[in-house]
Amino acid sequence: MASTAPATAPSDAGAPGNMADVRRNNLALVLGRVVQSPAGFHLTRAQLAAATGLTKASVSSIVLDLLDAGILREVGLSRQGERGRPGVGLELNPSRGVMGMEINVDYIAAGVTSLSGDLVVKEVRERDNRDSASGAVMSALAELASGVRLAASALGVDVLGGGLAVPGLVEAGSSTVTVAPNLGWVDTKLDVARLLPGVPLGVSLFNEANAAALAELAHSPHRRDFLFISGEVGVGGGLVLNSELFTGPEGNAGEVGHIVVDPDGAPCSCGGTGCLETVAGQDAIFSAAGITVKGRTRTESMADLLGALAAGSPAALTAVQRAGRALGVAVASASRVVNVRAVVLGGHFAVLDQWLHGPLLESLAKYAPGALPPEHVITSTVGDAGALLGAAGSVVRALVEAPHRLQA
């Protein structure tokens, strides 16, 4: 998982009134050092004491707490850089994990990752969620999550908590979807606890594109500034600046799908006109290409589109090229406002990149020449699991920052 800058080592000492806070900070500090260690490098207690500035006695006590909570495990003897007697190495416990879940317009999905971010098990179920009652969608997702949780348990992984990603604006504190136009949800409070009953970390709510952007950051930590654009029925965006997700004062930054690319264009689900989504959204492309959607799964419709493109269908080629040009206009506008160094394309934009990339770059060069090098417009490294991985990774990061939540 992506690491953040090392925290400043707190003192072992503290006033009686804040000793609990000191202890909690030290738990996070020690766990953070273990997380930040290179793959295959297992820090010992002595190495953790040297790295954090805490006493060996304090580190031993803290490590015992983290072992008891099931977050860490011991991995035999290690001499890695130490003189004298080898110490016992420590690593994140692979038998503990978190679940990432996603509700999108035409599917639901759930997957369990280890605390290190490795995907253990994943399942996607195609389902038309357009204008569906939130309760019905959540019931279907709860059933899916239960099966995935059992599958992870059979592999020896116990789920500690989860994250749910949805294609809309969210108020995470109250588990409320403020607005998700393509689902038809407005101010919809979700009973997220029903998805994973009994887990100690609970379930948190995230915007789908933001979650996917965080997954991209975790898997490409050298890429510090980028705009992630997710192509689904809707078009979402996540903005990463200086390795941090930027959401703006009300959490709504990155809504690339509602940049106007054609002022005289079609009405959009957001209430506006001529948004990128009306040209480059999945259903918009299918419709323009003459691909049947009603009564069919997205996999079937996408297979038909890819077949038509491979066969040189003029309608399919025109639809995708038009989407690419519109995407280039949106990227040009965004790059003028926010000086990102890269644009990462996910969802169907990655699937259609072979046909969409050229028109996108031509449009970008026309409307924002020199703003973004062509080689910095790339496809996602995490694929269609981005939202799941990002939601799960956010839960792990929250645990690393506050591991005391798992203490009895």
Image: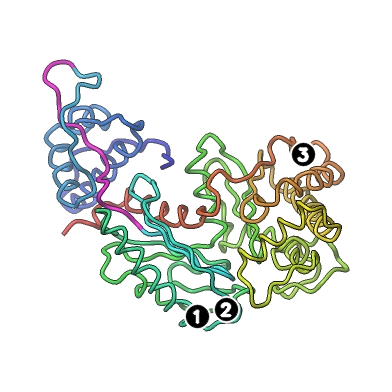
Structural distance between the alpha carbons of marks 3 and 1: 41 Å
Residue annotated with mark 3: 371
- The 10 Å Cα crowd at callout 2, few under 14, some 14 to 19, many 20 or more, is some
Circles 2, 1 touching at the beta carbon (< 8 Å): yes
Circles 3, 1 touching at the beta carbon (< 8 Å): no
Name which residue type carries label 1: Ser
**Residue drawn at point x = 15 percent, y = 27 percent:** 87
Residue placed most toward the observer, 109 or 363: 109
Color style of the picture: rainbow
Is 105 within the magenta?
no
**Residue drawn at point x = 56 percent, y = 37 percent:** 223
**Residues in magenta?**
83-98
Residue 185: assigned label = 2
Judged by depth in the image, the label closer to the viewer, 2 or 1, is 1
Q: Which quadrant would the C terminus be assigned to in this image?
A: bottom left
Residue 394 pos. (x, y %): 42, 54
Q: Which quadrant would the N terminus be assigned to in this image?
A: top left
Structural distance between the alpha carbons of marks 2 and 3: 36 Å
Which secondary structure, mark 3? Answer: loop
Name which residue type carries label 2: Trp
- Earlier residue among tags 3 and 1: 1
Is 86 within the magenta?
yes
- Earlier residue among tags 2 and 1: 1
Residue annotated with mark 1: 134
